[in-house]
């Protein structure tokens, strides 16, 4: 059964610091990765997606993907208290429909 | 665009009672997913509809859970004989197609079984 492993489980970074989150899929047929952010009491909302090897940057957020190792990472620079949330990594296969979510990394940005 | 609508937002049932949860996907979206989220298990896939047809219910506890999508504007998740372990936030999500596009989640229904 396909699994998506995220690390660390929780992370505390100071305001203005860099947060780095990791995600690996056990399914060699996975081609698509997403990062969702879920603030406390809210529903998940997509943050970024990446389908090709390399790096993608949107504002303070950068996502890396290494398809050979099925590993993706999310980096948040200049972290803000509003970035405190549960970050969920998700993966799916080409032509597939099922998106498998990891258990998440809980990020706390301390003022 | 109101986004995905879920009702009720909170539901409290007694053990053994039935619970029906409603989801209205974003207009034009052909894919509807149901998930269950708990602190312990995280976000678990329950079932998936495409163009109203049930495609995959592999995540559904077989005996007491059922889902339907009678028309393109709503889906229901029914739990019979609810048990305390069914307590969770049930999330509905829709997308323009299956796994290749962003899923838009509703606000969820928090089910508490006493």
Image (tube, coloured by chain):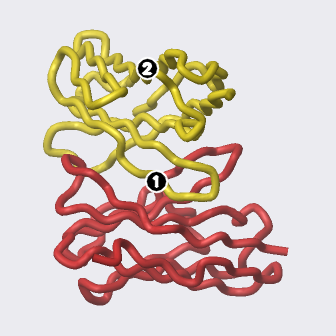
Please report contact status of discs 2 and 1: CB closer than 8 Å, yes or no. Answer: no
Asked which quadrant contains residue B56, the reply is: bottom left
Residue A84 location (% of width, % of height) = 59, 37
Tell me, what hue is chain B?
red
| Residue drawn at 76 percent across, 82 percent down | B13
Asked which quadrant contains residue B1, the reply is: bottom left
* Of residues B57 and A88, the one drawn nearer to the viewer in this rendering: A88
Chain ID for label 1? B
Task: From the viewer's perspective, tell me whether residue A107 is left or right of residue B16.
Answer: left
Query: Nearer the viewer's eye, disc 2 or disc 1?
Result: 2
Q: Residues within 10 Å of mark 2 (few under 14, many from 20)?
A: some
Residue that extends furthest to the right in the rendered view of this protein: B114
Q: Secondary structure beneath disc 1?
A: strand
Q: Which mark is residue A77?
A: 2
User: On screen, B46 above or below A105?
Assistant: below
Chain ID for label 2? A
| Residue drawn at 75 percent across, 61 percent down | B85
Give the labeled residue for mark 1: B45
User: On screen, B104 above or below A55?
Assistant: below
- The reply to whether residue B109 is visible in this rendering is yes
| Residue drawn at 59 percent across, 54 percent down | B37
Residue A109 location (% of width, % of height) = 62, 28
Q: Could you give the CA–CA distance between mark 2 and mark 1, rounded to whole angstroms?
A: 31 Å
| Residue drawn at 49 percent across, 59 percent down | B35
Residue A68 location (% of width, % of height) = 23, 10
Q: Which mark is residue B24?
A: none
- The reply to whether residue A24 is visible in this rendering is no
Task: From the viewer's perspective, tell me whether residue A4 is left or right of residue A70.
Answer: right
User: On screen, A100 above or below B45?
Assistant: above
Chain displayed in yellow: A
Task: From the viewer's perspective, tell me whether residue A20 is left or right of residue B64.
Answer: left
């Amino acid at each position: 059964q396909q699994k998506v492993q995220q690390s660390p489980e929780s992370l505390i970074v100071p305001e203005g610091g860099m947060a780095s989150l990791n995600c690996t899929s056990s399914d060699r047929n996975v081609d698509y990765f997403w990062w969702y952010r879920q603030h406390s009491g809210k529903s998940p909302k997509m943050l970024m997606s990446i389908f090709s090897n390399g790096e993608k940057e949107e504002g303070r957020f950068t996502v890396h993907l290494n398809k050979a190792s099925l590993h993706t990472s999310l980096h948040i620079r200049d972290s803000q208290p509003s970035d405190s949330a549960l970050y969920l990594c998700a993966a799916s296969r080409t032509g597939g429909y099922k998106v498998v979510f990891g258990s998440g990394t809980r990020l706390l940005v301390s003022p | 665009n109101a986004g995905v609508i879920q009702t009720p937002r909170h539901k409290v049932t007694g053990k053994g009672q039935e619970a029906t949860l409603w989801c209205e996907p974003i207009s034009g979206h052909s894919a509807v997913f149901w998930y269950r989220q708990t602190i312990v298990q995280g976000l678990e896939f329950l079932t998936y509809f495409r163009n109203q047809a049930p495609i995959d219910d592999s995540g559904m506890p077989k005996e007491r859970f059922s889902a339907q999508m009678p028309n393109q504007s709503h889906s229901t998740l029914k739990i019979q004989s609810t048990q305390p372990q069914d307590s969770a936030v049930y999330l509905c999500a829709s997308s323009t197609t299956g796994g290749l596009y962003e899923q838009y989640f509703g606000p969820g229904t928090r089910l508490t079984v006493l």
